[in-house]
């Protein structure tokens, strides 16, 4: 019976270590989708196909996405970069459907960081 308790405690400890490692590890093992509509050097960070952030430097747009995903990993599949010469209106995070509160907070903090 004692070995059952020890096994349960070991499983709890290993789960704790796994959660700790997941929080510390940077989530930079994904590719950022980049769509080119025109060669304009104007890059929009799109969230669920709505323009959210603009930059004239693709590296800054990629850094924005990496920073937002580091704050909230569920944003990973919702962000992409669009190079376009169109004037797209920037949306507020509250106006983008499909985002939960954690994702909105992560986007808003990232805008504050890059603003």
Image: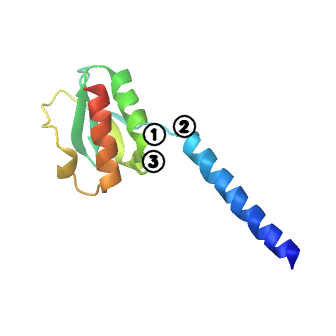
The image quadrant of residue 60 is: top left
Q: Are the residues tagged 2 and 1 within 8 Å (C-beta)?
A: yes
Q: How are the colours assigned in the image?
A: rainbow
Left or right of 81? Residue 38 is left
Q: Position of residue 48 (x, y in %)?
A: 28, 49
Left or right of 24? Residue 100 is left
Disc 3 element? helix
Disc 2 element? loop
The image quadrant of residue 41 is: top left
Q: In 3D space, how far apart are the residues under numbered discs 1 and 3 (Cα atoms)?
A: 6 Å
Rendered position, 113 above or below 94: above
Between disc 2 and disc 3, whose residue precedes? 2
For image coordinates 12% across by 37% down, the residue present is: 89
Q: Which residue is mark 2?
A: 26
For image coordinates 39% across by 29% down, the residue present is: 62
Disc 1 element? helix
- What is the number of callouts on the image? 3
Query: Quick one: which residue is furthest to the bottom in this view?
Result: 1
Q: Position of residue 87 (x, y in %)?
A: 12, 31
Rendered position, 2 above or below 13: below
Q: Which residue is mark 1?
A: 70
Between disc 2 and disc 1, whose residue precedes? 2
Q: Which residue is mark 3?
A: 73
Most foreground residue, 52 or 4: 4
For image coordinates 23% across by 39% down, the residue present is: 52
Q: Is residue 82 visible?
A: no
Q: Which of the image's four quarters has the N terminus?
A: bottom right
Q: Position of residue 11 (x, y in %)?
A: 74, 64
Q: Position of residue 8 (x, y in %)?
A: 75, 69
Q: Is residue 105 visible?
A: yes
Task: For label 2, count other residues whose C-alpha is less than 10 Å away and answer few (under 14), some (14-19) or many (20+).
Answer: some
Q: Are the residues tagged 1 and 3 within 8 Å (C-beta)?
A: no
């Amino acid at each position: 019976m004692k070995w059952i308790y020890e096994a349960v405690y070991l499983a709890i400890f290993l789960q704790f270590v796994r959660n700790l490692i997941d929080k510390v590890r940077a989530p930079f093992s994904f590719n950022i989708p980049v769509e080119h509509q025109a060669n304009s050097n104007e890059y929009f960070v799109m969230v669920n196909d709505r323009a959210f952030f603009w930059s004239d430097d693709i590296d800054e747009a990629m850094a924005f996405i990496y920073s937002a995903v580091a704050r909230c990993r569920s944003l990973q599949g919702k962000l992409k970069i669009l190079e376009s010469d169109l004037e797209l209106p920037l949306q507020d995070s509250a106006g983008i459907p499909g985002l939960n509160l954690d994702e909105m907070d992560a986007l808003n903090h990232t805008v504050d960081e890059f603003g």
